[in-house]
Each structure stands twice: as structure tokens, then as C-alpha cells.
Amino acid sequence: MDISRRDLFKIGGKILVLASAGATLEQITGAAPPSEAYRMAGHWWGMIVDIDLCIGCGNCVRACSKENNVPEGYFRTWVERYEIEEGKQPHVESPNGAIDGFAPLTRTDLKSFYVPKLCNQCADSPCVQVCPVGATFVSPDGVVLVDESYCLGCRYCVQACPYGCRYLHPEKQTVDKCTLCYHRITKGLTTACCENCPTGARLLVDFKNPKDPAHEILRTSMVQVLKPYMATGAKVYYKNLDGEVR
Amino acid sequence: MLVAALAVFLVIRSAIIPRAFGQYGHYRPGALDLVRQHPIAFAGQDTCVLCHDDEAKSRAAGKHAHVACEACHGPLAQHADDPVAHVPKLPDVATLCRRCHEQDAAKPKNFPQVATAEHSGGMACNNCHQPHNPHL
Amino acid sequence: MIPGVDGFIYPNEAELQWSILIVLYPYITGLVAGAFILASLERVFQVDAVRPTYRLALLTALAFLLVAPLPLQLHLGHPERSFEMYLTPHRSSAMAMFGFVYLWYLTVVLLVEIWLEYRAEIVALARSATGPKRWIYRALTLGSYNVSPEARRIDDKVGYAVTVIGIPSAFLLHGYVGFIFGSVKANPWWSTPLMPVVFLFSAMVSGIAAVMVLYVVSMKVRRTAIDMRCLDTIARYLFYTFVIDFSLEMLDLVHRTYESDESFRSLDFMVHTRLWVSQVILQICLGTLLPLALLAANQLWRFSEARRKVMYMIAGGMTLIGIFAMRWNVVIGGQLFSKSFLGYTSYKLQMGAREGLLSASVLMLLPFVILLILVKLLPPWREGEAHKA
């Protein structure tokens, strides 16, 4: 089945044109330009999570799942429970992502706490860096999103994320992840997880808003991001996070 | 021949490349709207209190002041859009209250928590505690 | 408790994203690059002894290159969108260059070189063949029937230039795959500047071994005597390349163990448990140390022709298994441990699924079927006019 150069280009051209017909239809029926009421340039989104307030109820996981139709067994957000005994490796669990909360812990002789996790909306995102076609990107207002009509499903971004927050949607066969409820925050609402957190452990912040409580919190509290040595420009800050947390 | 092939490629490319690709960055700007079009499931408590004034007042006076309505009642944007067509089902009290208030060593020490089996002996929580303002 | 999961993993890590098909892809492009380098040994570096395998090496490279995109296409969630890599390649992504490098290598390097090499025979067969084959040969001439000595001299010069361009192109074709893994800072099993180099040298090892084995098998099938000078030379180059490859892998291991960073404990445990068979037994012992010993023995002592053939065949076969195991250990191994360093998951290889064992086996057999057709169409054994060295 030796193909000469000429044949190759002929065949290649035909495939290209045929495939493009389908793609063109898809793109032409695409969206209108962004609405004027919400100015992307005026916002820079992130989140602040306070470990001292999280009770591990799992409300955030359930809310996110309902708001975003997250497929079962996959997680845009989840909660981990750390049990740290001195001199030993930490014991961590996240039963089904904590979608049904946790079984109560009775041991009081060790350090234990809950850690909610989500996409860190990295400003220097390694997942965006590796996408071969530009199907995932950082929006002008700082949210890392996936273009599900453009994603090939190669999963390079899933490999590149240090935090494990991406997955392949089993039905759509494209990559999915926390969108910081972009469809809500651009309409003046807060994220589903923050709305439903009963203790205020999760707080949506807009760094470009001079009145946002984030500025005061960052100025007065000890905060960390996850895996700071990865230098991903993570925009989810954790208050009162223990050094053992990965 | 190589030049001809390149020219053909460039022509085809300009025809099928997504509109305005690269406007904000290396992506299709239509993607932003695609994400924004996603339907909303949780109305947000600001919407709930527009109608449910009494419950809001009662809640504001107690310890659940900062707990959103839908945190217990579930996603109710559909109900907010059409209250008659979508009547929300009240949550199961036992499961609901225990999720937050069951005693757990990993929870912050100052958070109100009880070993519910001993605390109420199997009685429903709302036998004594009014959910919107639970203080006795 | 999720079956197959030990310890703690991030909830989305239970399922492996890159399957056996992604193990196959670097294996196949490695064979392409390696076979081409062996061919270039003769064409550019004037190692006359390996001339009998020149054409076979080129055809082997082509057969495998034609199959190379297939595991990728089968793996994609949306293969119908793969042309997007040509439309909007993301310059910061190593993967984006695949379409261009592949097309470049297939057309400008491999097809041109094969065409130039076989032109004399193609023209002769276009005139002498009968039936449908005649039309194939006529098409392959691309309209050029000039096989005068002057034309052949030009063919030779151009062919030489193409091979010279082809060597860095082959390095790029396989090296970028190594970079795809080596540049992922999130994964400590993959992230190392050595990765592209290790990939490249193991590719050369597998390619040379593949051509060596195919040569011996072809000669046996044709009941023709094996050119032992050729075979001994190939084995010698295989040995040299393998020594470099093994040194690089050992360097990675020693460096990793010495620095013993945060990931080491978790990775070490993984190698001793989940990767024990594939890494220690298959890749290192049977796939590297055994072939190295057999090849080294032939550098130190003189064995009989029959013995040498057996040793080379075992070495070659074990090498091919070992390099496959190496790809497996990199790709699958990199996904078995959690990035929390507190747990592991397992790879569930299914039989009939889209990315299952059956698909992988078919894809692995396909290049040999294609090679058979190519060998029938463009026999590597009749050297009508040997090109100038």
C-alpha cells in the first residue's frame, strides 16, 4: 500500500475538505459575541478556602454535582479528610469524593481536618500550556475553561494537572473540570459550592474588585496554595492549611 | 509541488478555522459563551428571600443566618422560575442535620456537634429544634 | 473501597487516561526512527557492511510509520477533530507538532528516499509488469521515466541529502514524544530532561533490533544465505547503542535514588510491587541485561556462525520485548501512583474495548502485513543499480 506524494496530498485534501464541512457547520452555528453587561476585563476570579471552618459535610460536592451535571464517579470538587499521627505518614480519605459526607471520626488523639479541593484556576496553568489545539484556556477574567466543542479528548491536560482536578467526561468524551461556575459568576451569582457551604469555608473572590474581602484576608492571614513549588500561579488560597497536605 | 500543496492547505485552513479564533488568546471566543449558556440549578438565597420573607427573618435571627436556603432545600432555580409547577420536596431531617452536626473529631472544635444517637435517642431533630432558627 | 486502589488517590485518578495504545505509539515511532537510523548508517556514514539491509530498513520504517497515527486516533475522544492540530496548533504544546512532523517525515523524508532508491526498478517494472500491478508501477513513476546514469547520479545526490535531513527528522519524530512526557512537571516519574534522550536511544535500539530480526527471518523464508558480515555489524551497532541506552537509564535511576526527593518513596514502592514484573524482570533483566550479555559476548569471543545467529535472534527478540516493556513502564507506570504520593491505582486492560488488548494486537500486527505487501511490491533484494556509497 505504497502511497506516492501526489496521491497522499490528493487523499489528504479530500479528507480535510470533508472533515471541514462538518466542523464549519459546528462553528457557524456557534455563539454570539460576549454580552456587554459583564466586562471580562474587570474581573480576576479566585477562591479562598478556610480549613478551620470546613466541617466535611460534603454539601459543596453535592451542589456542584447538581449544578453542573457532573457524571457519577467523577469530581469537579471533592473533600479530603487528613488524619495525622505524629511520626507517621498521614492517613487520607475521600469516600466517593465526600459526596455523602464522611463516617464520623472518633479518634481524638491525632490531628485531623478536612480539606476541600477544586481546580486551582492557575494563572500559569500547565494544563493550558500542553493543550495541542487550544481547547482549554485561561479566560480574560482568570477562569480556566474547556471548549467542549473543540476538545479532542487527548487527555494531555489531565496528565499535566498537578492537582488531579480534570477528568474525561464519559459521555461527551471531552475533558471536563471545575469552571468556577462561570455561568453563574458572570451573572452576579456565586459558585454553587460557595452558595451551599454552610460554614462559609469556601469564598469566591474577585481580586480586581477593590472592595472584595479577599484583600483584607490575604493581608492579615497566613495563606498557602497547594504545591507552591510547581509555580502554577494557583488562585485558590488556603487559610490555616497544614504542611502535610498535597 | 510542495508550494502548491501549502497554498491549498492555507486556503482550506482560512475557510474552516473557527471564527475569531485567537481574539482573546489561543482559543475560540465562542467557548466563553458556550460555558455561560449552561442552565442554572441553584437560584441563590437572594432570590429565595424575595418571596420567603418570614423564613428569611427567622433565619437571620439565629445561628443558621449564614446557611443558604438551598444548602438544605436543594437546587430550586426551577421553583423560583415557576413556583406552582415545581413544588420542592422538604428534605429528610435526620440525614440533613446529621451531615453537619454529627460529632466528628476532624470537625473544628468550636462547631456545634453532638453524638445524635445519645443526644436525641432516635427522635427527629425538628421535634425540638426549629430548622430556620435552631436555638432552644 | 474502590477495587484496585490502595491507599489514597485523588478521586479523579482512579481511571488511567493513557492506555496501552499510548504505549504502542512511542514503540511504533521508535521502531521507525531506529530503522531509519540503521539505513542512514550505510547511506551517510558509509558503513558498507549493512548495505544488504538498507532497503529492508526503509520499508520497515514506512510500514510502521503508516500505522503510527492509528493508535492515537483510536485513543482520542473525538478523532474526527484531530485535523484541528493542523488548523490551530498550540505552539506551547509538544503534542501540537505531531501532525507536521509526521507529515514532513512521511513525505519529504521517507517517501522521497524510497522513491529515489527504487526508481530504476519502478521504471523497469512499469514497462515489464502485467495486469493491475502495471498501473501501480506506472503511478509510482510519477511520470519520470528517465533512468540514465546522469539521472541516477542526481537521484543519488538528492537521496543523500534527504537522508542527511532525515536523521535529525527521525530524532525529532521520536524525540518530541520523549519531550511530551519529560516536560510534565506534575508527574515526577516522567519529568526529567533525560526523557527525550532515553526515548531516542531506546528507539534506536528497538529499530536496529527489529531490522536485524526481520533480516534473519526474511533470509530464512527465502532460503538464502545470511550475509554474516552484515549481521555481525548490525549486532555490533546494536551493542554500542544499547550500552548508551542502558547507561542513560541507569543514570536516571541512580540520580533519582541519590536525590531521593518527595516522590521517591512512593515511586520506589511502585517499582517493587506493581511494576516488578514489567520493569525489573522484563525490561531490565530479560530485555536489557540478557541481550547486552549476549551481544557483549560476541565482542569478546568468537562463536560459530550458527551460534551467533541464535544469540543474535534471542538478543533481538528480547530487546524488542524489553523496549516495549520500557514504554509500558513509562506510560502506565506514570499513572499508577497518586500525585498525593499516598496511594496507587491499577490498570484494567480490557480485551475487546476500543483501547483494549485486541485493538492493540491488531495494530501491532498491521505493520507486518503492510511490510509484506511493500516487500512484494518493491523487493528489497534485487539491487539493480547499487547507489554510490
Image (cartoon, rainbow, N blue to C red):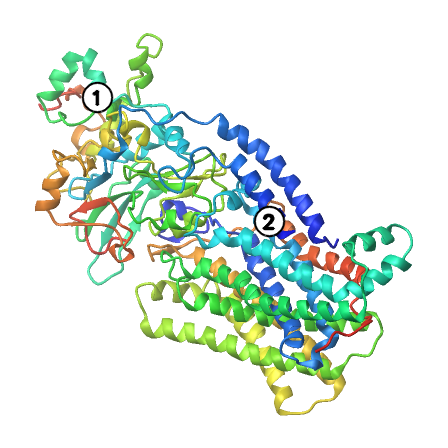
Question: Which residue position is annotated with label 1?
Answer: B45
Name the residue at 61% across, 67% down: C321
List the single residue furthest toward the bottom: C301
> Between marks 2 and 1, how big is the CA–CA gap?
49 Å
Please tell me which residue is depicted at 10% across the width and 39% down the height of the picture: B110
Categorize mark 2 by other alpha carbons within 10 Å: few (<14), some (14-19), many (20+).
Answer: some
- Among the 4 quarters of the image, the one containing residue C181: bottom left
x, y percent for residue C297: 62, 87
In the figure, A212 relative to C7: above or below?
Answer: above
**Secondary structure of the residue carrying numbered label 1:** helix
Going by the numbered disc 2, the residue's amino acid type is Gly
Q: Which is nearer the eye, C338 or B7?
A: B7
Amino acid type assigned to the residue bearing label 1 in the image:
Gln
User: Is residue B98 something that shows in the picture?
Assistant: yes
Q: Which residue is mark 2?
A: C356
Quick check: marks 2 and 1 in contact, CB under 8 Å? no
Q: Is residue A106 visible?
A: no
Rendered-image quadrant of the C terminus of chain C: bottom right
Where residue A216 appears, x then y in whole percent? 9, 40
Image check: B79 left or right of C168? Answer: left
In the rendering, at what x and y percent does residue B17 appear? 50, 37
Task: Locate residue C92 relative to residue B106 in the image: left or right.
Answer: right
Question: How many other residues sit within 10 Å of disc 1, few (<14), some (14-19) or many (≥20)?
Answer: some
Mark 2 falls on what kind of element? loop
Chain ID at mark 1: B
